[in-house]
């Protein structure tokens, strides 16, 4: 059994967190999607590109990003904002991303991030997210937090291959 982390701190992200978020984003993708997404695509993920993109996100309007820290070390993040779905109602929210340093997986960090995201939602506001159909680990995590697949799917191209993404919603 993996040890749970007792002292997880969740705080709003700052622009100065962009580099760490980028590192975690790339590491998490490489681990989580190994065997699902082409290895060449995962190897091509660029931390500098991600850092620049996260700097833009963190200086822009419309999304919120939280950082998970353990012993003052960033081990994860989550980002939300207005739903980008065509059928979204005004004010509906979307979980854009939730990623952890693979060393923090299974230790309660993602649970604390998700609890924070949910607690920050106004009462009654639905939250949706998209997950690769082949990512069973993530789907199990989302179901444990009250999300359910709603039957909507879309195709996403990654590394020259097409993948099905499934939408999950929490009312």
Image: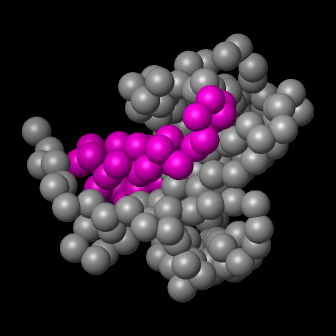
- Give the vertical position of 19 relative to 152 (above or below): below
User: Residue 92 at what x, y percent from top left?
Assistant: 74, 37
Residue 145 is left or right of residue 105, and the answer is right
Residue appearing at x 47%, y 44% in the figure: 119
Q: Would residue 132 be visible to someone looking at this image?
A: no
Residue furthest front as drawn:
123
The colour scheme is one colour
Q: Residue at x 55, y 37 (%)?
A: 36
- Whether 105 is among the magenta residues is yes
Compared to residue 143, the image places residue 65 above or below, namely below
Residue 154, image quadrant? top right
Q: Quadrant of the C terminus?
A: top right
- Image spot of residue 66 (x, y percent): 50, 62
> Looking at the rendering, which quadrant does residue 126 occupy?
top right
Give the residues in magenta.
99-127
Quarter that holds the N terminus = top left
Q: Is residue 22 visible?
A: yes
Rendered view: 140 above or below 44: above
Left or right of 79, for residue 11 = left
Residue extending farthest bottom: 16
Q: Position of residue 129 (x, y in %)?
A: 64, 36
């Amino acid at each position: 059994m993996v040890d749970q982390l007792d002292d997880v701190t969740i705080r709003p992200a700052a622009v100065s967190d962009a580099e760490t978020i980028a590192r975690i984003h790339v590491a998490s993708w490489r681990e989580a999607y190994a065997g699902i997404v082409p290895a060449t695509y995962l190897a091509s993920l660029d931390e500098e590109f991600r850092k620049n993109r996260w700097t833009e996100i963190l200086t822009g309007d419309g999304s919120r990003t939280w950082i998970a820290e353990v012993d003052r070390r960033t081990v994860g993040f989550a980002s939300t904002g207005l739903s980008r779905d065509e059928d979204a109602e005004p004010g509906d929210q979307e979980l854009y991303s939730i990623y952890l340093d693979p060393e923090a997986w299974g230790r309660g960090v993602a649970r604390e991030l998700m609890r924070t995201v949910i607690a920050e939602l106004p009462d009654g506001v639905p939250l949706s997210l998209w997950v690769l159909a082949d990512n069973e680990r993530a789907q199990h995590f989302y179901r444990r937090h009250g999300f359910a697949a709603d039957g909507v799917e879309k195709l996403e191209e990654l590394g020259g291959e097409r993948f099905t993404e499934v939408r999950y919603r929490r009312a």
